[in-house]
Image: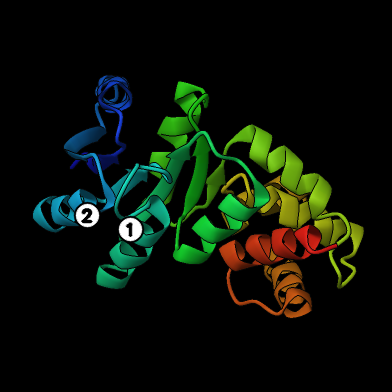
Amino acid sequence: MTPISVLLVDDHTVVRSGLKALLGTQPDIAVVGEAASGEAALEAAEEHSPDVVLMDLAMGPGMDGIEAIKRLRQRNGRQAVIVFTTYDSDADIVRAVDAGAMGYLLKDAAPEEIFAAVRGAVQGKSVMSAPVASRLFQQLRNPDEVLTPREAELLSLLTQGLSNRELGKQLFISEATVKTHLAHIYAKLGVETRAAAIATAIRREGMR
């Protein structure tokens, strides 16, 4: 099996080195490149074509992580980008998801969280750090368009990166019922994707 190729983007050498060593313990994950700025990230992504990019948000002068995510996604919509940062404000999360990030991890995330996020990203799953997901659950309980308790519960589970089948098992409902609930949630929030549903709920909560 071909390992999942990963590009590390962070302006701190010690962070990149630590991540590289950590990911190197997993036989199915391989770090193929590193970059210390948004501009360098675009060049490295062009050179290495990684499956997943782990991206910091703030990297000093020049292009920030948000702009780099936008450009990476414009170039290759199939390339998964996971934010890896110390910033966990609602505004940062919304901007990252709007830019096209598949996941949002804090730098104190457990190794298992990081491994799961990388593996999930190549499968199209959105994964967020536990503290971020926990706060989102509280915010998603009362969006402007009222969701049913079941819809609110399902929406909160989306932050864990579960597939429709996994959501069904978690909630003891069929995959078809999960799809129906998601359709209702998207309609109420006026969105078309899971990431957009989460971002919209956060944005509206922040405007209250």
What element does badge 2 sit on?
A: helix
- Figure quadrant of the N terminus: top left
Q: Residue at 56% of width from left, 54% of height from top?
A: 163
Residue sitting nearer the eye, 155 or 65: 65
Residue 33: x, y in percent?
Answer: 16, 39
Question: Who is closer to the viewer here, 132 or 90?
Answer: 90
**Dividing the image into 4 quarters, which one contains the C terminus?**
bottom right
Which disc, if any, is residue 192?
A: none
**Few, some or many residues within 10 Å of mark 2 (<14, 14–19, 20+):** some
Say left or right for 205 vs 31.
Answer: right
Rendered location of residue 89, percent (x, y): 64, 45
Q: Residue at x 46, y 35 (%)?
A: 116
Please name the amino acid that badge 1 sits on. Ala
Which one is nearer the viewer's eye here, 96 or 27?
A: 96
* Among the 4 quarters of the image, the one containing residue 55: top left
Describe the element under mark 1 as helix, strand or loop.
helix
Which sits earlier in the primary sequence, circle 2 or circle 1?
Answer: 2
User: Could you tell me the amino acid type at mark 2?
Assistant: Glu
Extreme residue toward the front, this view: 61
- Residue marked by disc 1: 68
Q: Quadrant of residue 9?
A: top left
In screen coordinates, is 55 left or right of 158?
Answer: left
Residue hosting label 2? 39
Q: Are marks 2 and 1 in contact (CB under 8 Å)?
A: yes
Would residue 47 be seen by someone viewing this image from the given angle?
Answer: yes
Residue at horizontal 29 percent and vertical 20 percent from the top: 14
